[in-house]
Amino acid sequence: MDVTKRQMTKIAREVNKLVIRTMKETGIGSGELDLIHAVRHRPGASQREIGVQLNMDKGAVARRVVSLENKGYLVRRPSPEDGRAQMLFATEKAESLKCSKAAVETAFYDWLLEELTPEERDTFAALLDRLYRRAKAESRGGFPCVSPRLEGLL
């Protein structure tokens, strides 16, 4: 039984709705935001690599890359190893978008935690950090503990 009732996921969805609404004002959709995020974390990746990472087909990636290039969020440079391949990089404008997204999330979380006492906030933050570190370690290891629990679920 899930004692969390998936509420961490549900809160993350709500803040994401606010981020998407706010980002639309900049002309960026959620799919484009995902692509920018992927390129920021893998500078120099090819469109094919980003497509695999985001589970997107070649044409969809190409259309989003062109759109983001035209908006000034991405640049393409020829690969030194393969002249036909293009490497993707985020621009300064994309980096400022990251700061904007973080600012929106921070404002939401500040609002959300207002009802807690300072002691409750500290306790919550400490527990959340502990859970985050555990989740990150599991992810980096390839989910060795969680994967067996998924057998037969899908």
Image (cartoon, rainbow, N blue to C red):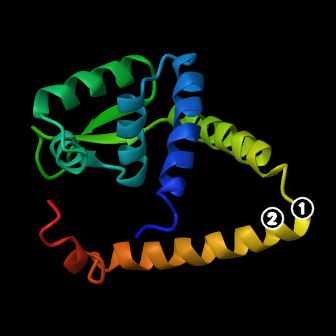
The residue tagged with tag 2: helix, strand or loop?
helix
Compared with 96, 24 (above or below) is above
Type of amino acid at the residue the image marks with label 2: Arg
Residue contact at pointers 2 and 1, CB within 8 angstroms: yes
Q: Quadrant of residue 61?
A: top left
x 13%, y 26%: residue: 59
Which residue lies under the disc numbered 2? 121
Left or right position of 62 against 101: left
Identify residue for label 1. Answer: 117
Left or right of 71 on screen, residue 44: left
Q: CA distance from mark 2 to mark 1?
A: 6 Å
Q: Is residue 95 visible from the viewing direction of this image?
A: no
Between 53 and 124, the one lying in front of the other is 124
At label 2, counting other C-alpha atoms closer than 10 Å, the crowd grade (few under 14, some 14-19, many 20 or more) is some
Q: Quadrant of the N terminus?
A: bottom left
Q: Amino acid at mark 1?
A: Thr
